[in-house]
Amino acid sequence: MKIMIDSDPFDPWQVLSDYQKENTNLEGQYGATAVFVGTMRDFNEGDNVAEMFLEHYPGMTDRHLENICLQATGEHQLLESLVVHRVGTIRPNDPIVLVAVWTAHRKQAFEACREIMEDLKSKAPFWKKEQLNDGQDRWVEKNTRGY
């Protein structure tokens, strides 16, 4: 399991490729990899969004993400998991989150990836402040569950 929270932009496909190459213990072990990549869109709640500032509580956020992955490991027999999440200033089309899981079978992979992402999106301690195109700032009060 690897959790990364960073303010630097990242290429999710390169991170995924590098991680899989580093983990030679996975060779021959997995039959499925499920991946979710989330990017920032330029609209929310009917308004155009210029950028977003994403805050977190170091330590608390890392532990929450680790617990999500540990729970999914127990429930879905994950062989490995990877969660990468951006913080700081994020602009439209920037990747925000990468969730990847490796399992023996596809059903476990799909379910685990979705459960990790849903928990991360709805319960993990991240706070989002949007800057709208008209210059106004607003905090995002709730996340969209399951969309």
Image (cartoon, rainbow, N blue to C red):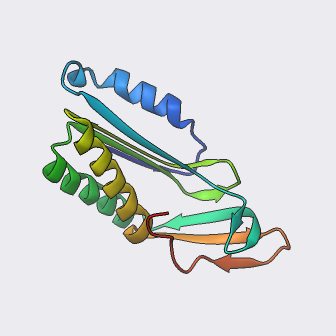
Q: Is residue 127 left or right of residue 117?
A: right
Instruction: Give the total number of marks visible in the rendering.
Output: 0
Asked whether 46 or 128 is in front, the reply is 46
Looking at the image, residue 105 lies above or below residue 24? below
Asked whether 113 or 60 is in front, the reply is 113
Residue 9 pos. (x, y %): 61, 43
Quadrant in which the N terminus appears: top left
Q: Is residue 113 left or right of residue 129?
A: left
Residue drawn at x 36%, y 39% is 34
Looking at the image, residue 137 lies above or below residue 71? below
Q: Quadrant of residue 120?
A: bottom left
Residue 99 pos. (x, y %): 40, 46
- Furthest-front residue in this view: 107
- Furthest-right residue in this view: 134
Looking at the image, residue 128 lies above or below residue 109? below
Asked whether 29 or 83 is in front, the reply is 29
Q: Is residue 27 left or right of residue 7?
A: left
Q: Is residue 1 visible?
A: no
Residue drawn at x 18%, y 24% is 29
Residue 30 pos. (x, y %): 22, 27
Residue drawn at x 21%, y 35% is 105
Q: Is residue 125 left or right of residue 7?
A: left
Residue drawn at x 24%, y 59% is 67
Residue 22 pos. (x, y %): 34, 23
Q: Is residue 2 visible?
A: yes
Looking at the image, residue 51 lies above or below residue 16? below
